[in-house]
Image (spheres, rainbow, N blue to C red):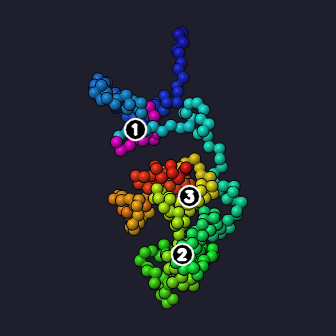
């Protein structure tokens, strides 16, 4: 008795048999073999269809333009992963940030807006205020109170004027209990983020009035958190309608005019790992001048 040769089936062959077993038997018994061969010869993508028919339907994704994508599991990858693609860090709060032991929302805010940033703003604000008013004084505690009131102004929205917010009878009590309205306007008038006298030497950078403080904030974002390997890079437009040299117009956005930033974010937690402003046509020249 002649022995039959046996052939082992690979994983794609088994998947193809499972898919074929679920099809209608009448399709295979109609005797339309010649017609099917004619159709496959006329269609230029018949070989691609046969390739994707080997996998189950759940493993195939079809794009809007008709492109078919096949899911590949990690076990189907051949060879070892490159050393530079191996993620060995432990995602989460960085060790340097964990040592600060933030116990409240204020402590977490001070990690991203640390004391060095606040002291820079305090220094340049005092310099600007003393040029016009030698008796102008400001300390770190009052500056933090001023920043907190600006957060509240953003929460209440643009429909509430400043006179209403500081009204003792109709406005929220937190405003007039924190500081007087005229004092708030005075700090807002003298608020600066850089040395105004040396700004002309940095005129090549359109972001010069806030570049120093912005770089410190971006560094805090990078060093305070270790992201996962899944990251996304996208743009975000902050609405703005004042005079600015690098304001953008994007008709497809809800706010058509504003400042555009490039953001690198973690997919799961939405944490901003890095941020960079878009400065228009001179962006490359500015980036190189900032690095040097």
State the image coordinates of residue 30 (x, y, percent, origin top left).
Answer: 31, 28
Q: Nearer the viewer, residue 86 or 75?
A: 86
Query: Earlier along the polypeptide chain: callout 3 or callout 2?
Result: 2
Asked if disc 1 and disc 2 are in contact, CB closer than 8 Å, the reply is: no
Q: Nearer the viewer, mark 3 or mark 2?
A: 2
Q: From this viewpoint, which residue is outermost toward the right?
A: 99
The residue identified by callout 2 is 131
Which is nearer the eye, 266 or 27? 266
Q: Is residue 87 magenta?
A: no
- Residue lying at 48% horizontally and 52% vertically, measured from the top left: 286
Whether residue 9 can be seen here: yes
Going from the N terminus, do you reach mark 3 or mark 1 first?
1
Left or right: 204 with respect to 119? left
Tell me residue 252's x, y (percent): 35, 58
- 175 vs 89: above or below: below
- 13 over 116 or under it: above or below: above
Residue of label 3: 215
Q: What element carries label 3?
A: helix
Check disc 2 and report its element: helix, strand or loop: helix
User: In this picture, is 23 found above or below 140?
Assistant: above
SS for callout 1 = strand
Residue span colored magenta: 54-65
- Please report the residue visible at 70 percent of the width from the left and 63 percent of the height from the top: 101
> Disc 3 versus disc 1: distance between alpha carbons?
43 Å
| Residue located beneath label 1 in the image | 68
């Amino acid at each position: 008795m002649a022995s039959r040769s046996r052939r082992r089936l690979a994983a794609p062959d088994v998947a193809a048999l499972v898919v074929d077993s679920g099809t209608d038997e009448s399709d295979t018994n109609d005797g339309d073999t010649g017609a099917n061969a004619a159709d496959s010869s006329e269609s230029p993508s018949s070989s691609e269809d046969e390739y994707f028919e080997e996998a189950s339907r759940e493993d195939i994704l079809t794009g809007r333009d008709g492109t078919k994508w096949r899911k590949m599991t990690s076990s189907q990858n051949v060879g070892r992963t490159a050393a530079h693609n191996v993620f060995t860090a432990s995602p989460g709060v960085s060790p340097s940030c964990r040592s600060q032991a933030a116990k409240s929302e204020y402590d977490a805010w001070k990690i991203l807006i640390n004391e060095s940033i606040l002291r820079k703003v305090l220094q340049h604000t005092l310099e600007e205020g003393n040029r016009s008013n030698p008796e102008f004084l400001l300390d770190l505690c009052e500056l933090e109170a001023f920043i907190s009131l600006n957060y509240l102004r953003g929460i209440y929205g643009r429909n509430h004027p400043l006179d209403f917010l500081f009204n003792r009878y109709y406005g929220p009590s937190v405003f007039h209990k924190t500081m007087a309205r005229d004092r708030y306007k005075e700090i807002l008038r003298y608020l600066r983020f850089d040395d105004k006298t040396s700004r002309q030497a940095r005129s090549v950078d359109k972001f010069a009035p806030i570049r120093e403080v912005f770089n410190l904030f971006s560094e805090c974002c990078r060093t305070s958190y270790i992201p996962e390997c899944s990251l996304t890079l996208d743009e975000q437009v902050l609405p703005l309608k004042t005079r600015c040299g690098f304001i953008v117009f994007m008709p497809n956005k809800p706010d058509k005019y504003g400042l555009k930033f490039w953001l690198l974010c973690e997919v799961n937690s939405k944490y901003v790992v890095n941020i960079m402003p878009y400065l228009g046509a001179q962006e490359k020249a500015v980036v190189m001048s900032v690095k040097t």
